[in-house]
Amino acid sequence: MMKIIFYCQYVFGIGHLFRSLELVRALSNHDVALVVGGPEVEIDLPSHVKLVRLPALYMDEKYTTLIPANPEWGVAQIQHQRKKILFALFEQFRPDMFIVELFPFGRTIFGFELLPILKAIRKGVLGGVKSVCSLRDVLVEKRDPIEYEERVLHNLNELFDFLLIHSDSEFLSLDETFSRSNEINIPIFYTGFVTKKPARSSGKKIRETLGIGPEEKLIVASAGGGRSGYKLLSSVVDACHLLKDSIGVELEVFSGPFMDNNAFTQIAAKSGPGINVTRFTKHFLDYLQTADLSVSMAGYNTCMNILTTRVPALVWPFSGDQEQGLRAERLSHLGAMTVLNDGDLRPERFAAMIRQGLTGKPQPSVSIDLNGAVNTANWLESLIKQ
């Protein structure tokens, strides 16, 4: 058994947090401290995981400015407090392993707290700790890719012992979005994609709770964390209003916990019989398991949820960078989802696509490794034996 500190800083959405949650759940043979540094989100943790919340910071849409979740605190004050908490945790917990989500491939602005810890580990000040980078499948474009890749390689090769990539190398490999991957000098392990598996009977319970009959269609619409989801969710509500007179439709909308209050209020004002708008549910996967159609953005977690439940899906990728679009296009080629463009969000067009989606069969099973959490835990077990 090892003591593991797992660091996750989410700044815009919630995908990084929920992927990290699945990973720490799988580490059930170990003593885990999960360190989170974003705005508070309701989560359930198993008994082997201790939650450590740092004073929360997030970022603007351009990922250039740190914003305190508590406006009464200044950023410099929060940074000082966070560094103190992290070093105190290491001294008290005495971990064998430090797993860092995304950094140094991203979250560079959080180097103020991560670089001192990682350098102290390298110097042996904090004991015999192994440092591991936990990375998703696709990296976003950078303004200066040459400087970016040089900096990543320096920090990765100097400060880390292992790199875990939560992807299937046959489907999406790191070299597609990081051109100098051949210069990574530490061991790399592709874990497969990380996703939660649904309980068998949970979907039936959802339908019973909602009072949905066997002939009615359930549509689940979602937007991840919610900061970029207004256009999609507003459009799907409008489209479903057009459909309700012709087919029996129940629409459950989950805006995401971070959607702007005004935007959420505008969408919620359009709710009514058969159209329910809420911010968040801990049972999202259960809803997808029993849904007849999913309408969503194309973040890592949602796409993996779609694959594991095999629900017919329409996805509208975030246009601010390449990440969601690249993933969604690859999956659409396998028949796993249909990609929407901006023109598809016009109410009449959207209603027609929803109607078509509701007539479809469950998506075909795809030959992609979805056992990333278990594979990660197994990899750690093999590391202990070595």
Image (spheres, rainbow, N blue to C red):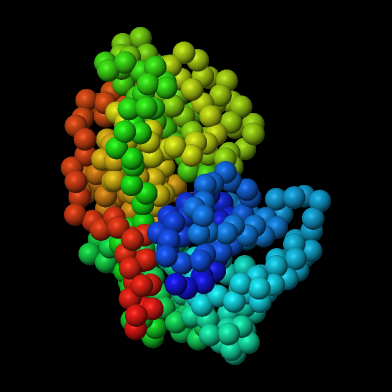
Q: Is residue 229 something that shows in the picture?
A: no
244 above or below 293? above
Q: Work out which quarter of the rendered image holds the N terminus and state it.
A: bottom left
Q: Is residue 65 left or right of residue 222?
A: right
Please state which of residues 62 and 193 is positioned toward the viewer in this rendering.
193
Measured as percent of width and height from the top left, residue 338 is found at 28, 39
Q: What residue is rendered at 32% in x and 64% in y?
A: 375
Q: Is residue 119 left or right of residue 99?
A: right
Residue situated furthest top in the rendering: 245
Please state which of residues 96 and 300 is positioned toward the viewer in this rendering.
96
Q: What residue is rendered at 70% in x and 58% in y?
A: 55
Please state which of residues 254 and 93 is positioned toward the viewer in this rendering.
93
Which quadrant of the structure image shows residue 371? bottom left
Q: What residue is rendered at 64% in x and 31% in y?
A: 262
278 above or below 150? above
Q: What residue is rendered at 59% in x and 89% in y?
A: 124
262 above or below 105? above
Measured as percent of width and height from the top left, residue 175 is found at 32, 72
Measured as percent of width and height from the top left, residue 165 is found at 37, 67
Please state which of residues 15 and 385 is positioned toward the viewer in this rendering.
385
284 above or below 214? below
Q: Is residue 354 left or right of residue 99?
A: left
Number of numbered callouts drawn: 0
Measured as percent of width and height from the top left, residue 58 is found at 63, 55
